[in-house]
Image (cartoon, rainbow, N blue to C red):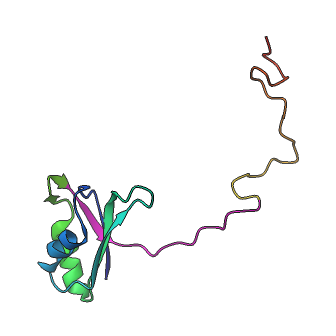
Amino acid sequence: MNIYISGLSYSINDADLNELFTEYGEVSSARVINDRETGRSRGFGFVEMPNETDGQKAIDELNGAEYDNKVISVSVARPRTEHPSSGGNRGRGNNNGFRRNSGGFGKNSGGFGRY
């Protein structure tokens, strides 16, 4: 069972998370997610427990519990979703055949509002 934990203190590391969940059964892996640029914890992590019953017991008992002076949320992790690749017209939406006003309305734009 893959378990998602949020609301973690930034001082928590993989070993701390492993120790917390070992109280409820065997832990295959425990990982706190860190920011790629700073290396600092992002405040959430994942724990993998091979026994579903042990995993559910950990979720039931730890969800809403205080750990390292923070209230944590613990739930079954949702499967990762695929995001569209960057490129193409991603995020541009449909403009219904209209062109964008390249003149704009700000100062130095050549459009309205030029003083």
In the picture as drawn, the residue positioned furthest to the left comes out as: 23
The quadrant in which residue 77 appears is: bottom left
Image: 64 above or below 109: below
Measuring from the top left, give residue 76's x and y in whole percent. 33, 73
Give the percent coordinates (x, y) of residue 75.
Answer: 30, 69
Q: Residue at x 21, y 85 (%)?
A: 53
Quarter of the image holding residue 83?
Answer: bottom right
Is residue 1 positioned above or below 97 on the image? Answer: below
- Residue found at x 16% / y 84%: 25
Residue farthest bottom in this picture? 51
In the displayed image of the protein, which residue is found farthest to the front? 38
Residue depicted at x 18% and y 69% = 16
Q: How many marks?
A: 0
Q: Is residue 114 above or below residue 93?
A: above
Q: Report x, y in % for residue 80.
A: 48, 73
Question: What main secondary structure does the magenta stretch of the protein show?
Answer: loop
On-image quarter of the C terminus: top right
Residues drawn in magenta? 71-88
For residue 21: magenta?
no
The quarter of the image holding the N terminus is bottom left
